[in-house]
Amino acid sequence: MHTTQPQNQIAFIDSAVVDPATLMAGLPPGVEVVMLQPGSDGLSQIAEALAGRANLGAIHLISHGGDGRILLGSTSLSDANLAQYHSVLQDIGSHLDASGDILIYGCDVAGGVQGRNLVQQIA
């Protein structure tokens, strides 16, 4: 498992999650938190927030999910539409250091074949 200093990490929390304060309290001290707004494309919000940043050790995505999908703002990302978001996902990944991680927290996101495909393709 990759470990990094919390100040080199950023967490994006979908505003639809219940009790985000509790989730924030569970993050290591120093992790920056950005709340994703429900009416806008969550991936675009993430890319915009990462502009000008480099060498992040981790990007945390905390959201609702389902079998093979994660909800980020108004975006429902799944293996079925992953290609549509290829360039923005590539941009998001470019802000990580060489051993950085994108950590996805969402109920059932990796569930089933579609979920495993989604996670493998993002990795």
Image (spheres, rainbow, N blue to C red):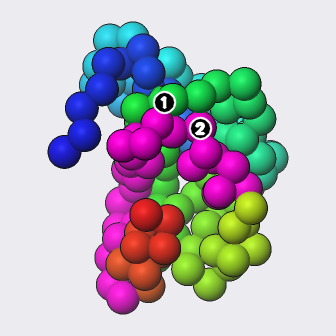
Give whichever of 1, 109 is nearer the camera.
1
- Residue sitting at x 67%, y 40%: 46
Please say whether residue 57 is visible from this viewpoint: yes
Please state, as top left, top right, bottom left or bottom right, where the N terminus lies in the image.
top left
Residue hosting label 1:
56
Amino acid carrying label 2: it is His
Residue at which label 2 appears = 95
Give the CA distance from mark 1 to mark 2: 6 Å
Q: Mark 1 falls on what kind of element? A: strand
Q: Residue furthest left?
A: 1
C-beta proximity under 8 Å, tags 1 and 2: yes
Closer to the camera, 17 or 102?
A: 102
Q: Nearer the viewer, residue 35 or 9?
A: 9
Q: In the rendered structure, which disc, 1 or 2, sits on the residue that comes first in sequence?
A: 1
Seen in the image, is 62 located left or right of residue 2?
right
State the image coordinates of residue 77 (x, y, percent, origin top left).
Answer: 61, 67
Question: In the rendered structure, does residue 18 fall within the stretch colored magenta?
Answer: no
User: Can you say whether 69 is above or below 37 in the image?
Assistant: below
Q: Secondary structure at mark 2?
A: loop
